[in-house]
Image (spheres, rainbow, N blue to C red):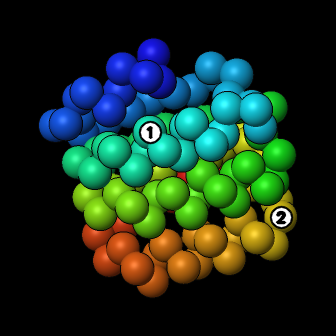
Amino acid sequence: MIKMLPRLPRLQMLVLCNISLSDENVYQFCQMLLNLRTVRKLNIANNRGLSSDSMSEIVGAFKGMPELREIDLSKNNCSAVTVYKELADLIIQNRRLKSITM
């Protein structure tokens, strides 16, 4: 499924809850996110197989998504300072961002 997503250039909402994202596939996931520039709402809740380092990488990839308005990261490993720093940078960069659920 992740390989198919870059072929959806007008996608506005993406829900990938509880799909067992893990540290092993985080690089591919981040590359896919960078191709989804029109997504406004992204929900990747409940992917507990991700380490805080992987979550930090994912949040960093959000910077390449200029239309992003809402993010749901709940029930993930988001407790590390690096994740919060990436989120703070994202909030500064993306003035359209309205909601982050953790």
Which residue is at a point 79% across and 56% down the rendered structure image? 53
Query: With respect to residue 90, does 57 lie above or below?
Result: above
**Does residue 69 show up?**
no
Q: Check disc 2 and report its element: helix, strand or loop.
A: loop
Position of 40 with respect to 91 (left or right) is left
> Where the N terminus falls, by quadrant?
top left
Cα distance between the residues tagged 2 and 1: 24 Å
Which residue is at a point 83% across and 46% down the rendered structure image? 51
Residue 83: quarter of image: bottom right
Q: Which residue is mark 2?
A: 80
In percent of width and height, residue 19 lies at 62, 20
Which residue, as the protein is rendered here, is positioned at the far top? 1
**Does residue 10 show up?**
yes
Q: Which residue is mark 1?
A: 32
Query: With respect to residue 87, does 39 lie above or below?
Result: above
Which residue is at a point 38% across and 33% down the rendered structure image? 14
In percent of width and height, residue 79 lies at 82, 59
